[in-house]
Image (cartoon, coloured by chain):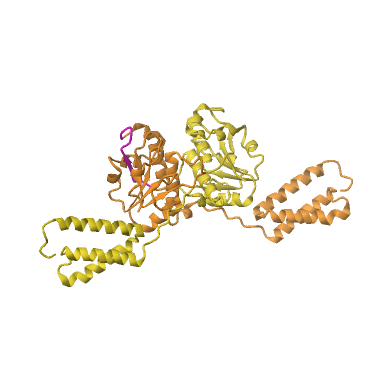
Chain colours: A orange, B yellow
Amino acid sequence: MEPAIVLVRPQLGQNIGMVARAMANFGLSDLRLVAPRDGWPNPEAGPPAAGADHVLKAARVFASVSEALADCRIVFATAHAQRDLRKPVLSPRAAMAEVRASGVKAGLLFGPERSGLATHDMLTAQGIVTIPAVPGFASLNLAQAVVVLAYEWRLSTPGALDELPRSPERIPATQAELDGLLAQLFAELDAAGYFFPPHRAPATRRTLAGLFAAARFTSEEVRTLRGVFRALSGRRARRPQDATG
Amino acid sequence: MEPAIVLVRPQLGQNIGMVARAMANFGLSDLRLVAPRDGWPNPEAGPPAAGADHVLKAARVFASVSEALADCRIVFATAHAQRDLRKPVLSPRAAMAEVRASGVKAGLLFGPERSGLATHDMLTAQGIVTIPAVPGFASLNLAQAVVVLAYEWRLSTPGALDELPRSPERIPATQAELDGLLAQLFAELDAAGYFFPPHRAPATRRTLAGLFAAARFTSEEVRTLRGVFRALSGRRARRPQDATG
């Protein structure tokens, strides 16, 4: 069951809009506002929502944190500093895993932009979710804090990563194809007088063979390279004959 | 080595500021701007950076993607749709793990707000990082896309999660303490005539014992509850004697 995103006394309509967009990006739609400073609806939330109008339209306003959480069976408060609350501290990933595993309605509390959640807002929370930011610069923008939790919620969705586009198959060329490429290259380089002095030719050939093996070209790429080498040596061939050719 | 965040033709100074804040939140500081639309420096970036001035001040401007990536040995392009590029597609987590494991300088490309990266911007990238958003609403705000990658970079930092405040120790009460609580409660409930009819008393006692066992109270909480029960039964005792008492 998807958790509710509960913004406690949010100040800027723009942030509410960005929260809505982030929620829609990651499959969340239950937005609850506790005493938004500038009232609701707030026209400033529209543009930054960037099309997440269904989230804004379904948003519900409550007078208190208790009312906003009335139907929630798990409550986590997002805070970057743990005050003297003596509550478990969870990473975003651990918290979303717990919500996912519970199968029940959860509420995720986010505080106002300037100050974060007040201690009295967190009293009934079962745990404090702390985003692992850098100590000393740990205050995230409200919408960005929501992004992190929404992203972890999405990652906890079975199969979410399976919906990523598949990496194209990259089937390495066969050894025969690689050998053919090397044979052509060595012949053309030999004609161009590249292997000089002759006693170093075996080592140079080994270096080139290693280089083309490491690159793990596909069959198609091997054919492309053979055309490239042919064109290069053709260009050379149109010049006056080389003394070593 | 920390990856460079490379914003390609960013449009809004405000977004650059939010990117800087998110970078500082998660320990990144190498911000590169390719042909920012409104020039650089841009005063609109200041307020949303919320104190990440060191990131803004150190930001470097480049005329082309190639110049911005000149010292990078790994390049990943962030895109929510994989065009016909035939490149590996990675999750943010997999990409940051690869950068972390490589130990070399990486560049992470992010496209302009409206259109995302152009195909020609991605040609030299080794892979495409795709944030696992919901298909159909997969376009993230620029700064929010940076948040996700910066957060995963931070998570890949050895020990980052160890810096979270520790959960307070919650040592469950001893069995003797629980038994003492139950004995007191049963005695006071017995005096109050709660166990009626008498033949159901054993089942009721089992229910209560199970309830207090499941809550896993600490020693301190058990002492608090004994005081609470004492106060409640004291209040009852001040009333006229109960017929069943």
Count of picture labels: 0
From the viewer's side, name the closer residue of A84 and A25: A84
Q: In this rendering, would B80 be left or right of A236?
A: left
Would residue A7 be seen by someone viewing this image from the given angle? yes
Tell me where residue A243 appears, x and y as whole percent: 89, 45
Q: Main secondary structure of the magenta part?
A: loop
From the viewer's side, name the closer residue of A209 and B98: B98
Tell me the quarter of the image containing the C terminus of chain B: bottom left
Tell me where residue A130 appears, x and y as whole percent: 44, 48
Q: In this rendering, would A99 be left or right of B27?
A: left
**Magenta segment range?**
A28-40
Compared to residue A115, the image places residue A29 above or below, namely: below
Residue at 34% from the left image edge and 67% from the top image edge: B176
Residue at 63% from the left image edge and 43% from the top image edge: B124
Which residue appears farthest toward the bottom when viewing the image?
Answer: B199
Quadrant of the image occupied by residue A36: top left
Compared to residue B198, the image places residue B11 above or below, namely: above
Tell me where residue B153 appears, x and y as whole percent: 54, 47
Tell me where residue A187 appears, x and y as whole percent: 81, 53
The answer to whether residue A33 is magenta is yes
The answer to whether residue A27 is magenta is no
Would residue B137 be seen by someone viewing this image from the given angle? no
Compared to residue A160, the image places residue A32 above or below, namely: above
From the viewer's side, name the closer residue of A83 and A178: A83
Q: In this rendering, would B132 be left or right of B75?
A: left
